[in-house]
Amino acid sequence: MQPKRVLIAGGGIAGLTTALALLARGIDVQVFERGAASPEVGAGVELSPNATRVLIALGLGPALERIVWNTAGKEIRLWNTGQSWPMDDAGIGSVARYGAPCWMVHRADLHGVLLDAVRERTPEAVSLGAHCIGLEPGENAVTMHLGDGRSAAGDAVIGADGVHSRVRRTMFGASSAAFTGLMAWRGIAPMERLPVPMRRLIGTLWLGCHGHVLTYPLRQGELLNVVCVVQRDDWRLESWFQPGTAEEWLADLPGWHEDVQTIIRAVEAPFKWALLSREPLRRFAQGRACVIGDAAHPALPLLGQGACLAIEDALVVARCLAEHATAVPDALARFEAARVVRTAAIVHASAANLPRLVSPELANQAGAADFVAREWATQDERQRNEWLFNYNALTVPV
């Protein structure tokens, strides 16, 4: 028999997508989210075809099409001179090539669409201000203990509670993390705060010797998302919510082009966090519990696949629980078998992508031209994307 009730720890993108996928298959869910409101705040997220085909299959296409940015072109620019090169844009022709679009979306907007869809099906499915502090396995059920003193019982527990997952710790013990020597900045700039010539509706990847900057429009061009990774070893706090200042951010990019400096000055609220690397788990499931998304395989933000992996996980774990009527532990073991190799490969590919974003060859124009021609050739870039974008969580064997 398929499970009647699944408990989900974490109400972010991973948890809500899983809830929606389970509800669509007739399985009751209860989501427990630590925060008192939406945990998804101001940042953009890339949704490549391997993720958008899942969201469209879940019926979210019309709602998302009103808020996403369909890529209309990308470019590479050199950190100091601003010299530009055209960049292969997976979004152009994505539907024809991969069967699904490529979207950029404000994380809070995506979260809102998911939350509305879950509540439309089951109004009381999401409990805010409640987080998992431990699990108690039983023969025919598993109990989740919450930080407010309550407990809840279900046929299965899915840990979608992020990189610092309590579910993962309960199942497998503490995990180790290594500082990468990198830190990241992020922020949103209202497009109206930029000079008119800079309000271009394209994505731009600025490459440098010691860091890179990625910008792309959100909300139909109303906002500009800004993400920056720099080599810096004196900041080791891993928190998405640590505020910084434009002055400190600019100090991390000395000599960078005036356009980059103008964009950073236009960001309303800069945030910074240290980048720590973790090996993906070799096991995702244990009995009636499993972990998904960043709780299982946190990836460095260097390949644009973190949210996409979580969305893939959500659909595959829902399929496993719905399609295998033997026992919940068997269904979760099938989920693990279906996902562990791909997710580990993407985690490692994300880390391995850094030399394509930061290089001493970019110190001068001649070296930069050779570097871009070698590392960012259009045909090579398309081949790199094939294995990422052609994956179909709707049909992969489970």
Image (cartoon, rainbow, N blue to C red):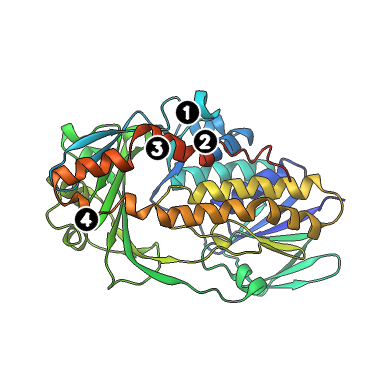
- For mark 3, give the secondary structure: helix
**Residue 135: where, in percent of width, then height?**
70, 72
- For mark 1, give the secondary structure: helix
Which mark sits nearer the N-terminus, 1 or 2?
A: 2
Q: Which residue is mark 2?
A: 49
Q: What residue type is disc 3 on?
A: Glu
* In contact (CB < 8 Å): disc 4 and disc 1: no
Disc sitting over residue 7 in the figure: none
- Quarter of the rendering containing residue 199: top left
Q: What residue type is disc 2 on?
A: Pro
* In contact (CB < 8 Å): disc 4 and disc 2: no
Q: Say few, some or many: other residues with alpha carbon within 10 Å of mark 1 (under 14 / 14 to 19 / 20 or more).
A: some
- For mark 4, give the secondary structure: helix
Q: Which residue is mark 1?
A: 94
Disc sitting over residue 360 in the figure: 4
Tell me the distance, in whole angstroms, between the alpha carbons under discs 4 and 1. 33 Å
Q: Which numbered disc, 3 or 1, marks the residue closer to the eye?
A: 3
Q: Say few, some or many: other residues with alpha carbon within 10 Å of mark 3 (under 14 / 14 to 19 / 20 or more).
A: some
Q: What residue type is disc 4 on?
A: Pro
Q: Which numbered disc, 2 or 3, marks the residue closer to the eye?
A: 3
Which mark sits nearer the N-terminus, 4 or 2?
A: 2
Tell me the distance, in whole angstroms, between the alpha carbons under discs 2 and 3. 15 Å
Residue at x-position 29% and y-position 71%: 233
Left-right relation of 307 to 132: left
Q: Which residue is mark 3?
A: 381
